[in-house]
Image (cartoon, rainbow, N blue to C red):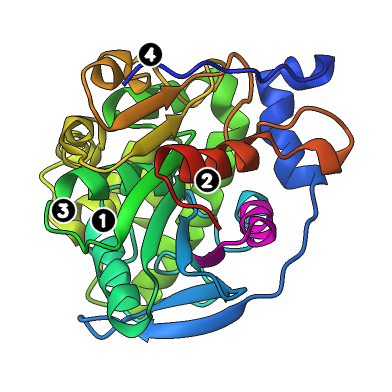
Amino acid sequence: MPILSCNFNPTLPFKSAHFNTMYRPLFMKDTIKYQRKRITTWDNDFIDLDFSAIGSETLVLLIHGLEGSSYSNYMITTSNYLNNTGFDTVCMNLRSCSGEDNALLETYHSGKTDDVDFIVRHLTTNYKYKNIIIVGFSLGGNLTLKYLGEYINMPIEVKGGIAVSVPIDLTTSQAELSKLKNKIYLNEFLKTLKLKILEKSEKFPEYKINKKLLFNATKFRHLEKQYTVPVFGFKNSEDYWLKASSKPYISKIEVPTLLINSLDDTFLSKECYPFKEAENSANFYLLTPNYGGHVGFTSSFNNDENKWVEKKITKFIQENIGICS
């Protein structure tokens, strides 16, 4: 599909990628009232789903980013906007991210699409929605794209997907995040991840960690070496990055799918802008605004006006996937 054109031109301070990235979580305080349902998984764990339903035939499944939740601002604003447009939403809290630690040692990672497939099949089996759209942000966007290209026999109710601010190539994007320009973000991610790994080691005595190395970790690979690699059975971090990246699956996507990655996103490497894949695909669309930061896309200090990405998501559902409320 052709590369989509873009009209996002924020006011001056929001043209700073860092300002745009930080403004949303710090200053946008939207609210929502979810209905939570806890789903028991095949491996005797649980996943919490937060519904915001208005009686639509279409359900939008939202997946948050690294260490986010259904209460991340971008999840709330997107749910509210979709509800106001006429769509039901359900937010999938990845394991350990719903405010309560999950039951197993295993939590989630960038490529763990079996959980996405399980939830999609739960929704199609237990609810009567005619259409399901998957929308993912950052890590959740990687899960979305990988799932849509990986699960060839997914339920027919899944009509398409949208992914926002996605590190589709983990090998190069993790290197980008390790640069000085992203130190403040990386430190925030590492802080919560370290606490989770420490909690797991206390809950599961058979899981041994080197606490000194854990506390001194300054890169994702340091935590992956102690947790993601051994717990999920990868050979090393490089093996994990390769297998969990969504980029190799984009060419296999068979439903209308949109990726929105801003060109100034400091989390993303040049490999995370798949222009060639979009040009050669019948189903994959790419939108690359000059500004937006990482899951920011705010344009002014009037928060009522900061709905650019929510409007793009809704427009793609209506015009490219062909589902109206």
- Please state the horizontal and vertical placement of residue 147, each as a whole percent of the image: 25, 50
Q: Quarter of the image holding residue 55?
A: bottom right
Nearer to us in this view, 98 or 130: 130
Q: Name the residue under label 1.
A: 112
Label of residue 270 in the image: 4
Label of residue 189 in the image: 2
Nearer to us in this view, 234 or 32: 32
Q: Name which of mark 3 and mark 4 comes first in the sequence.
A: 3
- Tell me which segment is drawn in magenta: 76-90
- In the drawing, does residue 218 fall left or right of residue 78? left
Q: Is mark 3 on a helix, strand or loop?
A: loop
Q: What element carries label 4?
A: helix
Q: Which amino acid does label 2 sit on?
A: Phe
Let me know if residue 209 appears in the view. Answer: no
> Do the numbered discs 2 and 1 sit on residues whose CB atoms are within 8 Å?
no
- Residue 312 in the image: above or below residue 172: below
Nearer to us in this view, 252 or 270: 252
Estimate the spatial distance between the alpha carbons at disc 2 and disc 1, rounded to whole Å.
Answer: 18 Å
Query: Residue drawn 33% across and 15% down?
Result: 275
- Residue 176 in the image: above or below residue 56: above
Query: Residue drawn 19% across and 58% down?
Result: 232
Estimate the spatial distance between the alpha carbons at disc 3 and disc 4, rounded to whole Å.
Answer: 27 Å
Q: Nearer the viewer, mark 4 or mark 2?
A: 4
Q: Which of marks 2 and 1 is in front?
A: 1
Confirm whether the magenta stretch covers residue 165. no
Estimate the spatial distance between the alpha carbons at disc 1 and disc 4, rounded to whole Å.
Answer: 24 Å
Label of residue 151 in the image: 3
Count neighbours of disc 4 (C-alpha within 10 A) and say few if under 14, some if 14 to 19, many if 20 or more: few
Q: Name which of mark 3 and mark 2 comes first in the sequence.
A: 3
